[in-house]
Amino acid sequence: METRPQDQPPVIEIKNLDVFFGHGESANQVVKSVNLNINPGETVALIGESGSGKSVTALSILQLLPYPLAAHSDTSSIRFQGVELVNEKESVLRKIRGNQISMIFQEPMTSLNPLHTVGKQIVEVLTLHKGLNKTLAKKRAIELLDLVKIPDPQGRFDSYPHQLSGGQRQRVMIAMALANDPKVLIADEPTTAVDVTVQAQLLELLAELQQRIGMSILFITHDLRVVKKIAQRVYVMKSGEIVESGTTDSVFSTPTHEYTKRLLSSQPSGTPDAIASDAKTLVAIKDVKVWFPIKRGIFRKTIGHIKAVDEVSFDIKEGETVGLVGESGSGKSSLGQAILRLISCEGSIHFQDQELNSLSLKELRPFRRLIQVVFQDPFGSLSPRMTIGQIVGEGLNLLENIQDAENAVDQALTEVGLDVSMKNRYPHEFSGGQRQRIAIARALILKPKLIILDEPTSALDLSIQSQIIELLRSLQRKYSMSYLFISHDLNVIRALCHQIIVMKDGKFVETGSSQEIFEQSKNAYTRALIDASIDIVTSNTDQP
């Protein structure tokens, strides 16, 4: 890892930064006396758990906080190349935002406009900031898509965000951020929700582009596994304060603060409980296909199919956890949705001696209680207009219509480790880990036989991941539920799953027990996934 020369003045210099939300006595201080420097051409990592104040600090640099709801103290200072940004005129800030300081956000699907093609959105950046005409802007946009290694950049220019994988959407965000050759790039959790191979590719891409453009990077993350690959210096943030800083090597090898030590030691661990030797088969999947038609022309003629799931078969036993792993676009989520009958499929889905694929929606209704789902993004899957009590009890009222629903809600919240007094609050009042517990409670309240967990820990802090894994283990122990656990994180899969299925391009490339897959796999694709995961973990957690 190259060390940047520090004989030049910092490109970003933050001094005594305070951020308050609210006014008067009710004001809440979320950032407290933060001091942080970024040197020219340097990558600095700002790390800490969710809610520590990382993103608020980053948004302060660009003065993008919800002013006047947010406020800085009189001593707060943020200087970019000597220019004071705090309370600067909007006309000056507009020339800096996107031009000299760009930002990549965590979730590209919500950052990109779903109504416009990715090419149009990059063109908009170029015409707005550089004044290029549409012809030149399109040419440059295609060059940028090629620069960030989007396959077939000319063809993808006219694609919409939903037509790209998660990794490709993040590459589009990087292309937009680099369109104007910025001096500073703020990357806010850019690799959190992508699989390990894409994560490694994005980190290499950022390092390569940094060398080419000579920009500085502020890399914000809660995942310490990626920091050592990209950053020269690290700032550790907790409850709005910087509790430790230094070179990446020194912070990782000899951390001094207890919080830093705890972050470094947080890894999913343990193994699942053994299933009963006489456990019956709960779900039998045979020759399931999910094909999406490709339509072209005025008459929308079908010219081919995207084979999201292509004739796959497997079983899940009572009390067993089956892990489904693979890169983005491999067909994992499509298979989960097919089992839930949320999308159409061909083949056999046999559940408790009943063929689900032959049932009408009305006949399927009683089985909805027995098969539940927990999604990746609990904030997106929980209604912002309903209280937690209403959300958890909704399925009970729709499918069971029992008298004592309130007590059932209380019990479900207690079982996932939440206080009953929280049930009158709304989703935005909870942390990411708490929202995921709420999503689990919503599934648990119906006492299902099978829960499909679709990337339930990918966007969570490592310490919260460990808590959710232990919670799932304890619930499985208590109720003998089965899980289909969909994930790209092999460390989580290893800690929770009895059997593992590796999926690529809609097909199963390897199946076996956790031990067989991790220790005896001969498949090149499986080994690549495992090696990418191990490389990130071991290279970033070497410490006494």
Image (cartoon, rainbow, N blue to C red):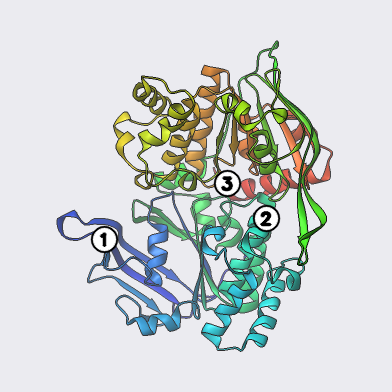
Expressed as whole percent of the image width and height from the top left, the position of residue 83 reads: 37, 83
Helix, strand or loop at label 1? It is strand
Query: What amino acid type should be assigned to the residue bearing mark 3?
Result: Thr
Callout 3 touching callout 2 (CB < 8 Å): no
Mark 2 crowd level (few <14, some 14–19, many ≥20, 10 Å Cα)? some
Which residue does the numbered mark 1 point to in the structure image? 20
In the image, 396 versus 8, the foreground residue is 396
Query: What amino acid type should be assigned to the residue bearing mark 1?
Result: Phe
Mark carried by residue 198? 2
Above or below 520: residue 139: below
Expressed as whole percent of the image width and height from the top left, the position of residue 441 reads: 45, 30
Which residue does the numbered mark 3 point to in the structure image? 541
- CA gap, disc 2 to disc 1? 37 Å
- CA gap, disc 3 to disc 2? 20 Å
Of all residues shown, which one is farthest toward the top? 278
In the image, 303 versus 460, the foreground residue is 303
Mark 3 crowd level (few <14, some 14–19, many ≥20, 10 Å Cα)? some
How many numbered tags mark residues here? 3
In the image, 541 versus 156, the foreground residue is 156
Q: Earlier in the sequence, mark 2 or mark 1?
A: 1
- The part of the image, by quadrant, that contains residue 57 is bottom left
Question: What residue sits 56% from the left and 56% below the top?
Answer: 227
Helix, strand or loop at label 2? It is helix
Q: Which of marks 3 and 2 is nearer the N terminus?
A: 2
Left or right, residue 156 beside residue 301 = left
